[in-house]
């Protein structure tokens, strides 16, 4: 009875120190083993029979440890595989996040630069458009001026031709100086219009002289005036031709400037369209890389959480294994102590029997 009282105390202490151990064999009980051993001792069972109970219990504990070792090794391999997989996923997510953020920054910078270039391009286009509008307005104004001045030159030539006709009629006696006076007024007006009044002055003076002579004017005087009128006409016609040539050159220069400005505007418009296409691509790049970056960041966080959860679970596996292993060691230790006590008890009983037998023989 002392043996079992001591073992019971050890069992209680062992149970107190390992409250968290796992019991993989719920049918196994050290208390039941102790009760069976006690019963066999009381029934005077052989030592081998008593020890066989302890051996079976010890084998059961060892078998359970072997099974637990196998399970724990599988768990360790699974944990290591999970660690490697999650770490690889985290590194992949970090790499993707780094690359996508770099590409995102590049696209954002390029987009800002393209927007600035497009704004400059737009300003240049507005400037050249204003320049083209100025050219068109100037050309329209000059065109009106050339048309008006051309008609004025033609009116001057017509007036000179009419004066020549009247002088010829005066020489023949069927035209009058009053008609010459009227055409001279038109000539005076056209001289003002074409700004050639000084070269008309000698003709006007000769007209006055002819008018003062009246019917007594001689033919040579009229011929001299006709000669002056022809020279004037030649001078005005040359001026008209020069004016026309100047108009042609002005129109050519206008067309050249217009062509150059239109080419620049066309180039700027094409450049603006290319920049807009580039902006669309950069916007798409920003959208894609932002999505990739967000996905990579979520992947990194998700796998980090799963890794931490796996570490916590594997730590639980390790703790359970340590507790279970230590608990079974305690059970083996108790069984070994119990076996030692049983052997010791059997030896004491055997010695007592020898002494008692010797005493009987003595008496």
Image: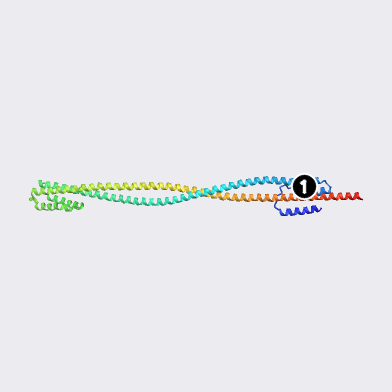
Residue 115 image position (x, y, % from top left):
42, 51
Q: Residue furthest front?
A: 362
Q: Is residue 110 left or right of residue 34?
A: left
Viewer-proximal residue among 208 and 135: 135
Which residue is rendered at x = 46% and y = 50% of the image?
106
Q: Is residue 120 left or right of residue 315?
A: left
Neighbor class of circle 1 (other Cα within 10 Å; few <14, some 14-19, many 20+) is: many
* Depth order, front residue of 186/41: 41
- Which residue is found at the position 65% from the left and 46% from the top? 73
Q: Which colour scheme is used?
A: rainbow
The residue labelled by disc 1 is 54
Q: Residue 7, position in %: x, y? A: 77, 52
Q: Residue at x 76, y 53 (%)?
A: 10
Q: In this view, does 291 lie to the left or right of 53?
A: left
Q: Position of residue 293 (x, y in %)?
A: 51, 49
| Residue 269 in view, yes or no | yes
> Which residue is more in the foreground, 214 or 349?
349
Residue 290 visible at all? no
Which residue ends up furthest to the right in the rendered image? 363
How many discs appear? 1
In the image: residue 69, left or right of residue 39: left
SS under mark 1: helix
Q: Where is residue 64 in the image (x, y as percent from the top left)?
A: 71, 46
């Amino acid at each position: 009875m002392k043996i079992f009282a001591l073992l019971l105390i050890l069992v209680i202490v062992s149970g107190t120190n390992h409250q968290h151990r796992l019991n993989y064999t719920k049918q196994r009980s050290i208390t039941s083993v102790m009760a069976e051993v006690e019963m066999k001792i009381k029934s005077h069972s052989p030592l081998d029979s008593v020890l066989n109970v302890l051996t079976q219990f010890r084998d059961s504990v060892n078998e359970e440890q072997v099974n637990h070792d196998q399970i724990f090794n599988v768990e360790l391999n699974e944990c290591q595989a999970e660690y490697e997989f999650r770490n690889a996923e985290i590194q992949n997510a970090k790499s993707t996040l780094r690359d996508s953020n770099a590409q995102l920054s590049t696209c954002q910078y390029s987009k800002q630069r393209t927007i600035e270039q497009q704004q400059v391009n737009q300003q240049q286009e507005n400037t050249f458009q204003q320049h083209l509008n100025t050219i068109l307005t100037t050309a329209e104004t000059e065109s009106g001026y050339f048309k008006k001045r051309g008609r004025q030159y033609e009116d001057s030539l017509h007036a000179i031709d009419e004066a020549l006709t009247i002088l010829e009629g005066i020489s023949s006696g069927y035209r009058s100086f009053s008609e010459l006076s009227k055409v001279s007024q038109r000539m005076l007006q056209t001289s003002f219009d074409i700004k050639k009044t000084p070269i008309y002055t000698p003709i006007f003076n000769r007209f006055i002289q002819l008018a003062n002579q009246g019917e007594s004017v001689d033919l040579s005087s009229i011929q001299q005036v006709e000669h002056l009128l022809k020279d004037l006409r030649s001078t005005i016609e040359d001026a008209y031709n020069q004016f026309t040539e100047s108009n042609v050159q002005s129109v050519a220069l206008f067309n050249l400037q217009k062509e150059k400005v239109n080419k620049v505007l066309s180039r700027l418009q094409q450049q603006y369209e290319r920049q807009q296409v580039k902006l669309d691509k950069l916007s798409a790049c920003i959208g894609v890389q932002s999505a990739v970056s967000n996905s990579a960041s979520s992947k990194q966080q998700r796998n980090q959480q799963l890794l931490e959860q796996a570490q916590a679970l594997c730590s639980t596996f390790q703790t359970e294994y340590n507790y279970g292993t230590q608990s079974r060691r305690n059970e083996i230790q108790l069984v070994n102590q119990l076996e030692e006590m049983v052997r010791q008890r059997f030896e004491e009983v055997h010695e007592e029997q020898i002494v008692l037998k010797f005493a009987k023989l003595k008496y």
